Image (tube, rainbow, N blue to C red):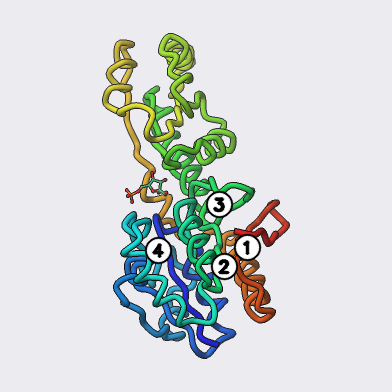
Amino acid sequence: MKILVLCSGGDAPGMNRFIYTLSKNFDDVYYAYKGFKGLVEGDIRKLDHSEIEKVKDEAGAYIRSSRYPEFKEKKYFLKGLKNALKFDATIVLGGNGSQKGAKELKENGVNVLFVPATIDNDVEGAEYSMGFDTAVYQGVYTVENSMPSFHTFSKTCLYKVMGRYCPKIAEAVFEKTNADYLIASESDLKYSKIKKIIKENEKKDKGTAIIVKEKIIDMDELKNKLEAYPTQIRVQTVGYLQRGGKPTKMELKKADQIANQTYKLIKAQIFGNSVMFEKIEKIAVKPL
Ligand code: F6P
């Protein structure tokens, strides 16, 4: 069987492990270099299993990824389609946009499976998507390993976390760290409330941890708004430490589980589906 794998959009910790575990089962695994871009341009390479083995526990995407909105345009899509049709199975790893690309391939006769892989954890119908646990872990690690110093000087820290338009990472980091305040949407920008928390903490000679989801407010603007209160405010961007963070044990386990399920579906020739953690411990197969 000739298998094609591609990663699309933002990479997610666990992608390499998934590809390693899946490819163990097949002799002929290929990948579209840089995702849909490589598929369209015909940049399709044979996977060297010994190479993917070296990075199976690392974040990033050995087979590379890209954001490639051109795939929505007919002339590019048709080129990609022609290449995908040469394979017995095409596996797409990515987020919502990539899922749409996979669906389009399915509707045009490609034997495709889609696996949610985005730290944002915002794929519809999936409780868990590859990369989320690592992204949360990295956020928690950053807060837990910097707050002690901020407490020493009663400083406030604004932790900017990734998540695009989805608050899940920010919410999870907030819960797991017992931070003082969460800004997960514009409605959380309650400046007088935040200043009050900072003031109360200062009275106790304590610092203040505020988790801020990206894309809500410019961090300098937020800092300036709060700086009105006489305290020292620092900004710590967690950002790419989350996407590039070393996959957690749970991440690797989940990547193995979903890769094994994907293998079973390929063997049984069941295509045209998303293979996803519908519940944290339950993999579901849902039509694209
Ligand atoms: O979608 C994953 C993600 O890491 C988001 O959390 C973030 O907003 C975005 O990608 C960053 O994308 P880029 O790599 O283009 O800066």
Q: Residue at x 52, y 90 (%)?
A: 27
- Which residue is under mark 4? 60
| Discs 1/3, front | 1
Q: Classify mark 1: helix, strand or loop.
A: strand
Alpha carbon separation for disc pair 2 and 3: 23 Å
Three-letter amino acid code of the residue under disc 2: Leu
Residue 168 bears which disc, if any? Answer: none
What whole-number distance in Å separates the C-alpha atoms at marks 2 and 1? 7 Å
Q: Does the residue labelled 3 lie within 8 Å of ligand 1?
A: no
Q: Name the residue under label 3.
A: 133
Residue 217 occupies which quadrant of the picture? top left
- CB contact under 8 Å: marks 2 and 1: yes
Residue on which disc 2 sits: 113
Hey, what amino acid is under mark 3? Answer: Asp
Crowdedness near tag 4: few (<14), some (14–19) or many (≥20) residues, C-alpha within 10 Å: many
Question: Circles 2 and 3: CB distance less than 8 Å?
Answer: no
Q: Position of residue 214 (x, y in %)?
A: 39, 35
Please tell me which residue lies in front, 126 or 269.
269
Residue nearer the viewer, 267 or 105: 105
For label 4, the SS is: loop
Residue 256 percent across, percent down from the top left: 61, 70
Helix, strand or loop at mark 2: strand
What residue sits right under mark 1 in the picture?
275
Disc 4 versus disc 1: nearer the observer: 1
**How many angstroms separate mark 4 from mark 1 (CA)?**
21 Å
Tell me which numbered mark, 2 or 4, is placed earlier along the sequence.
4
How many residues crowd around disc 1 within 10 Å: few (fewer than 14), some, or many (20 or more)? Answer: many
Name the side, left or right, on which 36 lies relative to 111: left
Residue pictured at 34% horizontal, 16% vertical: 226
User: Picture coordinates of residue 129 (x, y %)?
Assistant: 56, 54
- Give the crowd class for mark 3: few <14, some 14-19, many >=20 residues within 10 Å: many
Front-most of residues 182 and 234:
182
